[in-house]
Image: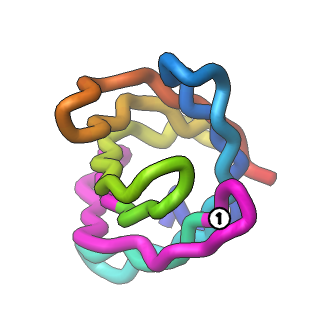
Amino acid sequence: MAIDGTWEITINSPMGAQKAKLELAASGGALTGTQQAQGSSQPVANGKVDGNAVSWSANITTPMPITLEFSGTVDGDVLKGSVKAGAFGSFPFSGARA
């Protein structure tokens, strides 16, 4: 599947650019893996794959406890889309295969 592998993404948030590393694997329409950022690692939750469209969420604790909801597309070695951060709104993210 196009999403399988290691990705390095940057979330363009009001707090500045936030970097994260993803280890992702697709099986049928399910997406699993881990997301690492700011010294912690979380499992990917609610992961879905539909063609080149992907979505997942991650429950982070730093800099504050919040659930990040990602949706995006894979185009070769490029992953981009938006991330919803609760009441803080949505921000763009982009990245590439590591």
**Residue type at numbered disc 1:** Gln
**Magenta part mainly helix, strand or loop?**
strand
Judged from the image, the secondary structure of the residue bearing numbered disc 1 is strand
Q: Position of residue 16 (x, y in %)?
A: 63, 20
- Which residue: 41% across, 72% down? 44
Q: Which span of residues is magenta-colored?
A: 36-57
Q: Position of residue 14 (x, y in %)?
A: 49, 17
- Which residue: 45% across, 61% down? 60
| Residue at the extreme left | 87
- Which residue: 21% across, 40% down? 86
Residue 85 quadrant:
top left
Vertically, is 10 above or below 35?
above
- Which residue: 54% across, 48% down? 63
Q: Position of residue 3 (x, y in %)?
A: 52, 59
- Report the residue marked by disc 1: 36
- Residue 67 in view (yes/no): yes
| Residue at the extreme right | 98
Question: Looking at this view, is 43 or 49 the one in front?
Answer: 43
Is residue 50 found inside the magenta-colored segment of the image?
yes
| Residue at the extreme front | 64
Using residue 9 as the reference point, say whether residue 70 is left or right of it: left
Is residue 2 found inside the magenta-colored segment of the image?
no
